[in-house]
Image: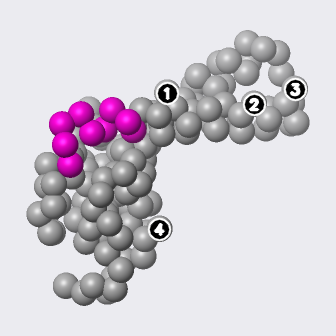
């Protein structure tokens, strides 16, 4: 059964076949969460289209971080209106805890948007 586009993005699957895992280890493995498969284990497509490709993913990660700061800042402001140091501590804490997901999903979205692998459509295995 074919995986949906959104499901493939959320599960960090290959953009071409939507079945193979992009990362070798789960995000919860904090010592290895950055290790990506060189090729898709299912279809064999290269997951790094060119050297240095993922440098652009830093901009996506930056966008995630800015969105996190705004959302957490507004949530704190409208719920408890804490001091500035509380804002800083909470945002930094959440950013550190969320770093593995930020790293992974910035790469996943960048590969899906700019990897040139195209959307598979209705092609079946």
Residue 73 vertical position relative to residue 83 in the rendered view, above or below: below
Labelled pair 3, 2 in contact (Cβ < 8 Å)? no
Q: Residue furthest top?
A: 85
Question: What residue is pinned by disc 4?
Answer: 6
* Nearer-N-terminus badge (3/2): 2
Q: Residues within 10 Å of mark 4 (few under 14, many from 20)?
A: few
Q: Which mark is residue 57?
A: none
Q: Is residue 116 left or right of residue 67?
A: left
Q: Residues within 10 Å of mark 1 (few under 14, many from 20)?
A: few
| Residue 113 belongs to the span the image colors magenta | no
Question: What residue is pinned by disc 3?
Answer: 81
Q: Is residue 53 left or right of residue 40?
A: right
Please, what secondary structure does the residue beneath circle 2 have? helix
Q: Which mark is residue 96?
A: 1
Q: Residues within 10 Å of mark 3 (few under 14, many from 20)?
A: few
Q: Residue at x 42, y 43 (%)?
A: 106
> Residue 15 is drawn in which quadrant?
bottom left
Observer-side mark, 4 or 3, equals 4
Q: Residue at x 25, y 87 (%)?
A: 124
Observer-side mark, 3 or 2, equals 2
């Amino acid at each position: 059964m074919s995986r949906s586009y959104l499901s493939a993005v959320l599960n960090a699957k290959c953009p071409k076949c939507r079945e193979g895992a992009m990362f070798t280890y789960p995000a919860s493995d904090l010592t290895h969460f950055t290790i990506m498969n060189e090729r898709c284990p299912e279809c064999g497509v290269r997951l790094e289209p060119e050297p240095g490709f993922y440098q652009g993913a830093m901009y996506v990660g930056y966008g995630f971080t800015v969105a996190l700061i705004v959302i957490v800042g507004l949530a704190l402001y409208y719920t408890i209106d804490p001091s500035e140091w509380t804002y800083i501590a909470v945002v930094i804490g959440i950013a550190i805890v969320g770093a593995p997901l930020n790293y992974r999903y910035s790469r996943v979205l960048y590969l899906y948007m700019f990897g040139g692998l195209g959307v598979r459509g209705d092609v079946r295995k």
